[in-house]
Amino acid sequence: MRLTAKERILVHLLETRSAEEPSEAPRGLAQEGIAEAVGVGLRHLAQSIRPLIRDGLVREQRAHVRGIRQRRKTYELTTTGRIEAIRVRDRALAETVRVQDPAGIRETSVGDALKTVGRGASLLAIFRSVRIAGVVDLPSLVPSAPSSFVEMLSEAPTIETFVGRREELSATTRDDGPRMFIVSGVAGIGKTWFAARACQQLHGTKNLFWHRVQPWDSARSILGHLGRFLAALGKPGLQSVLERGDVVLGARALAGDLPGSNALFVFDDLHHGGPELPSVFRLLLDSLERAPDSRALVLTRHAPAFYDRRDVRLAGLVGELELPELTPIDVAELGSRAQLTPAVWTFIRRRGGHPLLLQFLQQSHHSPFDPLVALEDFDRFLSEQVYSNLSKDARRAMKLASSFRIAIPAEALLEDLEVPHDVVLELTDWFLLRRVGGNRYDVHDSIRDFFDRMLTTVERRNSSRLVSGCLDRLAAQALADRSFLACIDYASNAIALGVPPEQKGRLLETLGDAYAELGDLPASTTAHRQAISFAARAETVARLDRKMAFEFVTRGNLSSAKAAIEDGFRALGTLESVEKGWLELMRAWAVRYEGKLEATYDHGTAALQIFQRHGDLKGQARTLVELARVEAGWDRSEAAEEHLKEALQIVRSFEDPFPLARVLASLAHLVGFGQGDTQQASAYYHEIDALATKTGNPAIRDFTLGARAYSDLLLRMDFQTAERGFEEAADFFRRRYDANGVLNSRAGIAVLRYYQGRLGEARAIIEEVVAKHRRLGNAADAIEIIGYLAEISLLAGDVAAFREVVERYREPDLVSAAEVEPAVPTMYRAIVALLDGDAPSARKLLDEAGHQVRMPEAIHYHRVASVLRSIMGDEAAGEEHRLLSRDLATSRSRRTFLATTDERARRIREVILKAQPQRNVS
């Protein structure tokens, strides 16, 4: 069955309806769409269209094409052309073809084949399948319907025909049997095609994941790809722990997220992976044991080392599939319409069916070349039968493509590398380029290696320059788009090409930035340190030092952070640079972790002045938030609000919604807890909700759940809503395996129980939370909640327990954190002194705490001070403290505190009087 190019154009235009709006045409009516559909190069398309226009069958016009900014030439059938196109179509529909579907291989008419497939199938797609394979794979004719399942298949090939492998496919797509299949075989045997077929069969029934393993892949990057996929399934745990840099917890997160994922995971080219990958695949295998609805296909040329015979025979976790060559029957199905020469059939009988070779043989079957030579010398076969038949532009394009180890975006080929569209079509027809998901193209390893060997020294240098420039641009764009895993692939591929020093330094910085965003501290600092060795400018060195300092300070590694900061300042010397602003901001963050608010403010002010001189808005916004935090710590909420409102005005212009959400959350907390303006706080939270809805990212709202719950508890006295908020916050953090977040949410429940008067429950929760925080090394979080434990013990009349809690402030792992906010432990030591009958010490400690205390602890301090002063006989001072406590609470809308404070003060007084020695305490 054969249609000429002109006949194919007529049929295509008949199948492609014109838009109802004449000013806009579908892409299929433009030159690019027609060339792609009918398999004619753009350069040669005019040779077929001009006669059709001359004969009055086709009309040319200019129109806006959907998705293209400029007006383009478009084509449509005339009335005469439509009659002729219908005649051609009807003749084609009567032709007989061999088709394949789940029932097997059979002959049928083209018309019946289209009826079987149903709406959406294309007559020209059948012609293309016949031309390529001779057998029409019916399920592949219709583009997959939109799936409610998550599919990350951008590296999976788009397959048009498939034969054989029925038993192997059945084994891998069943719901029972091994959880992981090791699919092995020589290069070109069809491992990737096999896995793509499995994905095609499982479309609409399982979530689908595909990753092509690269030489630069690490255990963390493999987990990163899995985390991104699982997060799309509503299981953000793995991704979250990796972003926090907690690789150890990643094992637990993967095991927790996989069950219920109902997914097929495909890992292609595992043999390219480095020595650390077996550990992550062992982890995946162990996790799959607890995920009965999921399977993994691992494609490799060599047997991997992460499993042994016990996993295969005893546990039944692993299935081994060594793909054989296609049988003569399968080959006959694949090439029955290609009119193969006797030499080719001899080859088939001798060799069986090697899919990659068979694809080339179908293209070169009219050549006198003996295909048996391919058994001995594949390079010679490619050289004499493939390379020699390519156009000059196609050879150039393949030499460029051989420098890519990753799938090549179409725009990179067509625009960056200036490969004509008809050359891309030529190369796909020769199976040298294969189309994969996401409008990208891939090159088989064997083909890549061949064309790489064909490069001369000059060609290699020029190719590396062009391709590395393209990859450099793609890496920068991926980083800007927050596609960090793709950025790593692009940058790593470019670096492997041996780029000039300046470009290598830039790529290493980009690589380090991407690793930092993924939470991979070792990889990010390694890349940034390597980039420093290629940096020619002092400002570049300082920027890299600053980036490392940021990663260190956010992880509490202050010594390394300070060293990197000083390295950055030394690199700059007297040079005036915006980087000095960033380094000053890093200094501010570092000293803030040490509780030095004055130094934090000084460094922050210096940073802000530098940012303002250089017009760096991002730096200004971050510094203003830092200064607001200091002002709030000094109980200067109006000044803090001014800083935050200035920051808010800046971040509203940012594309990234998270800086805006964070500033809004800071404002909500400040005006709510710092000023008692619950109405304005609600307005800020409502804006965060609207932002989450607008961006479709619920995490923008979810990270504020804990703060909202405290607002409901302390400001609105809405216990029911507060409890629901704390539970939602705990669930949010639990799904992300964020132990600190879960514990702090549990602490919120404890504070709720405290105000509800359920002191026993509150005490039990706090003891649990404090113990876990201490085991995790979170002294600051433990100190935050211990104060409630001390007061609960006192209210319960358990003076011994109260003394024990106060002594905890002196324990080695807590003493440094207690010194950051010393007023609370000092206040409780004053109570201990009074319990011991030492009134002078109690007065001294109480005065000391009064000089140290800041909001919000001041509200509680003055209540305790009122009780102690009263007990020690100074009723006037006691009343003054009582009123001050109430005034502070009233001005900040602490409704829940106000509702309970008098009863709590009475109970504390009662316990102290009962427990202290019978002596004069005045």
Image: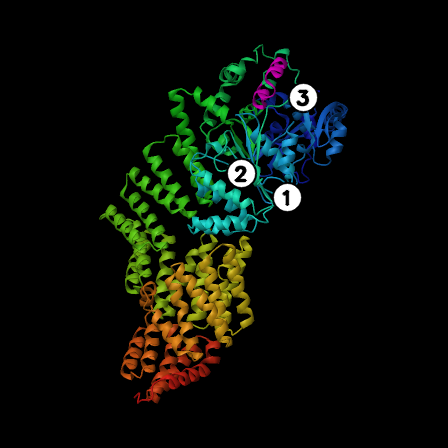
**Rendered-image quadrant of the N terminus:** top right
Tally the marks.
3
Q: Is residue 439 visible?
A: yes
Residue 799 placement, left or right of 236:
left
Q: CA distance from mark 3 to mark 1?
A: 34 Å
Q: Which residues are magenta?
A: 344-360
- Badge 2 local density, few (<14 within 10 Å), some, or many (20+)? few
Q: Quadrant of residue 7?
A: top right
Q: Is residue 639 magenta?
A: no
Majority secondary structure of the magenta segment?
helix
- Badge 3 local density, few (<14 within 10 Å), some, or many (20+)? some
The amino acid at mark 3 is Ile
Q: CA distance from mark 1 to mark 2?
A: 37 Å
The amino acid at mark 2 is Arg
Of the image marks 3 and 1, the number of the one nearer the N terminus:
1
Q: Residue at x 70, y 33 (%)?
A: 121
Q: CA distance from mark 3 to mark 2?
A: 36 Å
In the rendered image, which residue does mark 1 sit on? 147
Looking at this view, name the residue that lies furthest to the top.
368
Q: Is residue 351 magenta?
A: yes
In this orientation, which residue lies closer to the viewer: 313 or 462? Answer: 313
In the rendered image, which residue does mark 2 sit on? 310
Residue 697 placement, left or right of 646:
right
Image position, residue 100 (x, y; %): 70, 28
Q: Is residue 180 visible?
A: no
Residue 572 placement, left or right of 495:
left
In the rendered image, which residue does mark 3 sit on? 329
Secondary structure at badge 1 equals loop
